[in-house]
Amino acid sequence: MYIKILIGSLVLSLVVISCRGSKSKISNKDLTIEEVKNRVLAYEDSIMTFQKSQKVVPAYFQDSLINALKLFYSKFPEDKSAAKCLDKIQMFYSGNGQVQLAVKYADTLIEKFPKYKNRSLVLESQAANYDMFINPRDTNKVKQYFTMLLKENKSMETDKRKGIELRLRHLELTFEEFIQFQSK
């Protein structure tokens, strides 16, 4: 186990040195798609190494990954991986409690990539963010995203569809009140 941690630390050090060194030689505008993809993968690998060794991931690697994902989307917005980058960004922000940023990137994803394979999850996430985490609650947005979800997913499981439809009928209730209402 100690050897894996040592090797992981060495890999992380090399990634940090190579990424810092590349900034002085190559500006972000000159990077190729493969170079940006490799940067994203390097930071993802670094974060995975820290997580596997049960250590706290340094903010530097988290911030660097987010910046690399944003760079990819801004440089290559038409590439098929751009949608995945936006999804990772919104999930990262959501997971860190930065809901305003999460909804911003999720909205971009929804708008720019209507055929994205995980669109239903993003729509559901948006509805939940506006229902539970955005203050004040925006019931119009909750309705908008749940309605889109229902319309775009005709083959959704019946129980899930009924649950969403019930939530739409009772948007006057906060999420907590709705849970209590359901348990009666």
Image (cartoon, rainbow, N blue to C red):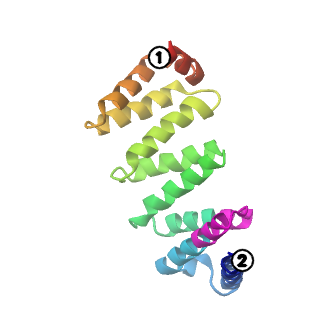
Disc 1 crowd, CA 10 A, few/some/many (<14, 14-19, 20+): some
Disc 2 crowd, CA 10 A, few/some/many (<14, 14-19, 20+): few
Magenta stretch: includes residue 72: no
Amino acid carrying label 2: it is: Tyr
**SS label for mark 1:** loop
Amino acid carrying label 1: it is: His
Q: Residue furthest top?
A: 184
Q: Which residue is mark 1?
A: 170
**SS label for mark 2:** helix
Q: Nearer the viewer, residue 139 or 132?
A: 132
Position in image of residue 18 (x %, y %): 67, 84
Q: Main secondary structure of the magenta part?
A: helix
- Answer left or right for 155 relative to 61: left
All told, the count of numbered labels is: 2
Q: Which mark is residue 180?
A: none
In the image, which residues are magenta? 44-64
Q: Which residue is mark 2?
A: 2
* Quarter of the image that includes the N terminus: bottom right
Q: Nearer the viewer, residue 166 or 127?
A: 166
Ranked by sequence position, the earlier of labels 2 and 1 is: 2
Can you say whether 4 is above or below 120 in the image? Answer: below
- Answer left or right for 23 relative to 137: right
- Identify the residue shown where x is 43% and y is 65%: 81
- Identify the residue shown where x is 40% and y is 27%: 164
Q: Residue furthest left?
A: 155
Magenta stretch: includes residue 61: yes
